[in-house]
Amino acid sequence: MPGRWKKTSFSTTIILVLVATLLVHGLQRSELTITRLTDGIWRLGDFITQAFPPDFSRITNILIASFETFEIALIGTIFGALLSVPLGVLAARNTTPHKSVYFIARGIISFLRAIPDLVWGLIFVVTIGLGPAPGIFAITVDVIGFCGRFFAERIEEIDSGPMDSLKVSGASKLAIVTGAILPATLPSFIATCLFSLEQSVRSAIILGLVGAGGIGVELQTSMQLFRFKEALTIILIIFAIVLGVERVSAYFRSKII
Amino acid sequence: MNFKTENLCKRFSDGHYALRDISFTAKEGQSIAIIGPNGAGKSTLIKCLVGLEEITSGSISFGQVEISNMNKKNLRELRKNIGFVFQNFNLIQNLSVFHNVLFGTMGRKANPLSWFPLTASKEDRELVMFHLDRVGLADHAKKRVDHLSGGQQQRVAIAKMLMQKPKMIIADEPVASLDPKSGLEVIELLSTISREESLTVISILHQLDFARNYFDRIIGLKKGQIEMDKLTSNVSKENLDLIYSNPLEEIIV
């Protein structure tokens, strides 16, 4: 019978020690104590008490801002997804015209994905100014990083048969992309876009906190002015938007896939 | 379209010769079945014929055009005249029969508007229905391809290939993944098309009875070389035994 304990390898031991050290160091730096935790819970209770009942007096403005958030997410996702298609074709091994193009396209996707959406939001607020436009740009860039990678990987997975079929009939590269790659990958692309839209709605809310328009701006203002009843209304509406988009997206994805 | 290969050789990077000194001529309107055991070089030969594999030496000519040193642009032009039928149909499963057949114009027509049912010309739309009628599937035009049987899908692939208006047909085991009845229907269809339009047909086949009944000539490949090249009427059981190392009865079963 094998023993209950197996001797760990040297590399596993090093990794475990490293993770434990980072955990202890992180907890020390965050000054997370039981007292602070219990105080926090009491304050959360205070916030909830002060926030109830929610204040719906500015509901029209809040709904308009919510709609703006949804529009920022939708427009950013559509722009990002459209730009991801050619980038995905260039970043897939089986469709890229040249190895150097493949590496450049993959590099662009990795770069866009590596920088978080909030950072893109800050950059575009500084360069473009406040309002929905920097939010749309930030989401577009974020979606390219996400969809570009998924599109390229999906293209690499497709059966080469339909592509060969068009190639031997003398079809151009554009025809091969249109007649073999896009039809075979479209359901998966749409499912990825819907998933991306869910993420974009969440991002658009957060982006508002850095001035990129939408309901995030309203939430930040309410919290800073201690209008907690209004803040609760906004939080409830955010919950309804995120849940609604998730449900609708999940329904369509199940229909497509 | 006349067709000729001379001393065709294909050697892979590992030094292995898949084809050695393959020379044969196909006259316009002639149908040729290429038979042989697995690993004989049949698929490599077919791929070399359409430029999907580069040849090591020798030459391939379609009509007066030699393709061995052809650039990509000219090769594309030549391919527009060659209809290729695949073993696995190679259709887009989630699109309609009509749309798949319309994609057959992609080689001939550079304008993207002609590739979609919504924007294609009336002439092309009618041509799709004409070819679907020809392969007996006009009633299935609106169905998705993945709702059809294997035999029906191969007939859709043939209709798509006909949209090219080919001068020659090359088929890579067109009935290998079909049941005997569907296989017979597909071979009969290819034979009829070849006869009606005087098209040269070169097809890899494993079914010797199909080769004997529907093709003018049989070429037997073995270990990358032509072991036999005869008119079907002159092919004997002994000839076939020479190609397949095992007794013929076992192969047919």
Image (cartoon, coloured by chain):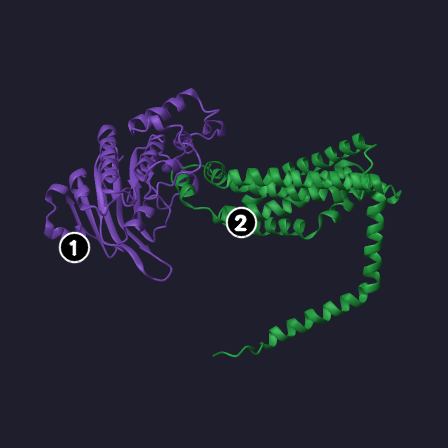
Chain for numbered disc 2? A
Residue A47 against residue B143 in the figure, above or below: below
- Picture colour for chain B: purple
Can I make out residue A31 in this image?
no
**Does residue B216 appear left or right of residue A113 in this picture?**
left
Residue B132 position by quadrant: top left
Q: Spot the green chain and give its letter.
A: A
Give me the residue at 71% from left, 50% from top: A116
Report x, y in % for residue A81: 61, 40
Q: In the image, residue A174 lies at what x, y percent? A: 50, 37
Q: Residue at x 64, y 71 (%)?
A: A15
Residue at image mark 1:
B250
Q: Residue furthest right?
A: A225
Under tag 1, what secondary structure? helix
Q: Residue at x 17, y 50 (%)?
A: B252
Amino acid under disc 2: Glu
